[in-house]
Amino acid sequence: MDKYKTKRTINKWFSSIKFEQLSPNAREIIAEFDHYSKKLTFKKVMWLFLYAINDQTKSLRHLRQQLVNPQLKKVIGLDKISYSQLSRALRGIECSVLMEIFNQLLSFVQEKTEIKSKKKLYLIDSSTFSLSKPSYEWAHFRPTKSGIKLHLKICLMEDGWLHPDQFELSHASEHDHEHIESFIKEPLATYVFDRGYLDFERFDEMNEKGFFFVSRIKKNTKVHVQAHIDGPKPKEIVSDQLVLLGSNVYLTGLLRLVTVERKHHSSI
């Protein structure tokens, strides 16, 4: 994306934020931030980091180097900025304010794209971010490094439109399936998640409450075939079965298992 398109895109994103409609507490926090950071105000920090995310900037040092661009300096309204100033600005932003902005934008999107539950498709997945062990000892992960995990639910709409709907942060050491419950809220909607979120008891609860879901299963999952579903199907479908999953410890109710052949990959 060239610089002009980048500017227009970020300005469009930024114009959707209604700062005057934030809570009195959030506005007070922003005012205090601006008071102590007159050069790098809250809005400038937001604009700058939106640019960094859109440009896939790798680090604060790289972002500082990009500020040699005259056009970017003009848009931001900054002549120069140091790495330490960027670092302090990032640390100084209250997460509660960002969360309020996220919820405001989410409400705006939901009003503009109202969809009936039975037509909603949610994608749920997680991403792990490794961190330095000495600097982030609180972020439990592995003996040699720290880390956090972002659990994200995305609403997929018609024509390929999508938007983030909900997220949670956890220690990277926590299992995905421990967080699935907080993302499953709307009966009749369909939820798609990877095998990291496998929880057989949760599957049965979702079935009973009218939730629809699609998930991969692990290679070592014990499958008990109860029936084969006949009829015309795409050539990629290897099998279509009604099954029970699990073992003597816990056996699920009746579920549908579809095996799909992938080119140059094993079947799923």
Image (cartoon, rainbow, N blue to C red):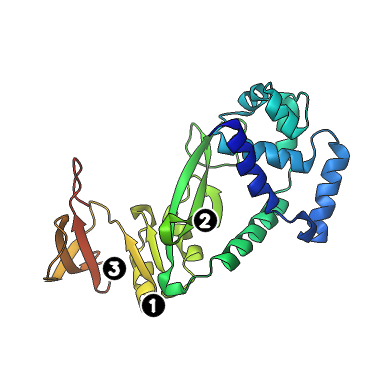
Please state which of the two labelled residues, at mark 1 or mark 2, is closer to the viewer. 2
Q: Report the residue at 73% width, 43% height from top.
A: 93
Q: Distance between the residues labelled 2 and 3?
A: 36 Å
Please state which of the two labelled residues, at mark 1 or mark 3, is closer to the viewer. 1
Above or below 23: residue 208: below
Q: How far apart are marks 1 and 3 (CA)?
A: 21 Å
| Residue pointed to by mark 1 | 210
| Residue pointed to by mark 2 | 163
Q: Distance between the residues labelled 1 and 2?
A: 24 Å
Tell me whether the residue at label 2 lies in contact with that at label 3, contact meaning CB atoms closer than 8 angstroms: no
Q: Report the residue at 19% width, 40% height from top.
A: 264
Q: Quadrant of residue 68?
A: top right
| Residue pointed to by mark 3 | 250
Q: In which quarter of the image is residue 71?
A: top right
Residue 106 visible to the viewer = yes
- Please tell me which of labels 2 and 3 falls first in the chain: 2
Count of marks overlaid on the render: 3
At label 2, the amino acid type is His
Above or below 63: residue 194: below
At label 1, the amino acid type is Gly
